[in-house]
């Protein structure tokens, strides 16, 4: 092997992340889950990318491995959820759970609906839950909304679906 090939080989070794980085990340996250029985959500992809200095693709590969192992699952519009055997988890779409909130809280037409920040904390989801709120607005269940505006209940959903 010539000097050029040796230098090129050294450069390649130091310029790429180590193979199997996603495996190491998955093992580390799995250990955190095992060590913390109260942990219900995985760290965000951004946190994993920052902590391990990896790309989004590598972080997703680690999360997908955890999914394959039955340790975690993605939640649309929210962070990945830890899966623990024996614990019930509501897997319905967020808009359905929000619609149910109207009935469980006995909200009436015209009453204020909880804000996006209150809902984000209550359902442990990220702020972009506005998609679920927009679905309810489009279905005629909620009215108003928008920056600084209070959403109100327009119609009380029925059990079979939304009215």
Image (cartoon, rainbow, N blue to C red):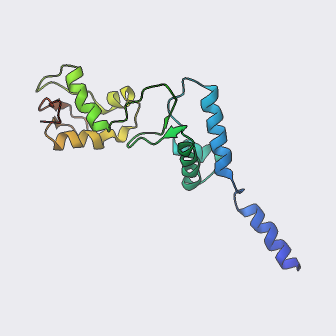
Q: Quadrant of residue 104?
A: top left
Q: Is residue 78 above or below residue 111?
A: below
Q: Quadrant of residue 13?
A: bottom right
Q: How many marks?
A: 0
Q: Is residue 88 above or below residue 142?
A: above
Residue at position x 11%, y 31% from top? Answer: 155
Q: Position of residue 83 (x, y in %)?
A: 50, 33
Residue 140 appears in view:
yes
Residue at position x 33%, y 27% from top? Answer: 118
Q: Position of residue 101 (x, y in %)?
A: 25, 26
* Left or right, residue 60 beside residue 130: right
* Left or right, residue 76 beside residue 157: right
Residue 43 appears in view:
no
Quadrant of the drawing holding the N terminus: bottom right
Quadrant of the drawing holding the C terminus: top left
Residue at position x 18%, y 40% from top? Answer: 137
Q: Nearer the viewer, residue 125 or 95?
A: 95
Q: Residue furthest front?
A: 86
Q: Position of residue 156 (x, y in %)?
A: 13, 29
Residue at position x 46%, y 39% from top? Answer: 79
* Left or right, residue 13 beside residue 82: right
Q: Is residue 2 above or below residue 51?
A: below
Q: Position of residue 68 (x, y in %)?
A: 55, 46
């Amino acid at each position: 092997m010539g000097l050029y090939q040796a230098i090129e080989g050294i450069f390649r070794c130091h310029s790429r992340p180590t193979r199997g980085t996603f495996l190491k990340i998955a093992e580390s996250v799995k250990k955190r889950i095992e060590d913390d029985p109260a942990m219900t959500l995985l760290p965000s992809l951004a946190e994993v990318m920052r902590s391990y200095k990896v790309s989004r693709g590598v972080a997703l590969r680690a999360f997908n491995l955890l999914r394959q192992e039955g340790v975690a699952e993605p939640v649309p519009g929210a962070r990945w959820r830890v899966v623990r055997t024996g614990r019930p988890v509501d897997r319905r779409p967020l808009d359905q759970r929000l619609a149910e909130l109207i009935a469980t809280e006995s909200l009436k037409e015209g009453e204020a609906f909880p804000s996006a920040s209150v809902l984000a904390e209550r359902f442990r989801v990220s702020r972009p839950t506005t998609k679920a709120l927009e679905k309810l607005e489009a279905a005629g269940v909620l009215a108003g909304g928008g920056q600084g505006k209070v959403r109100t209940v327009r119609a009380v959903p029925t059990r079979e679906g939304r009215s």
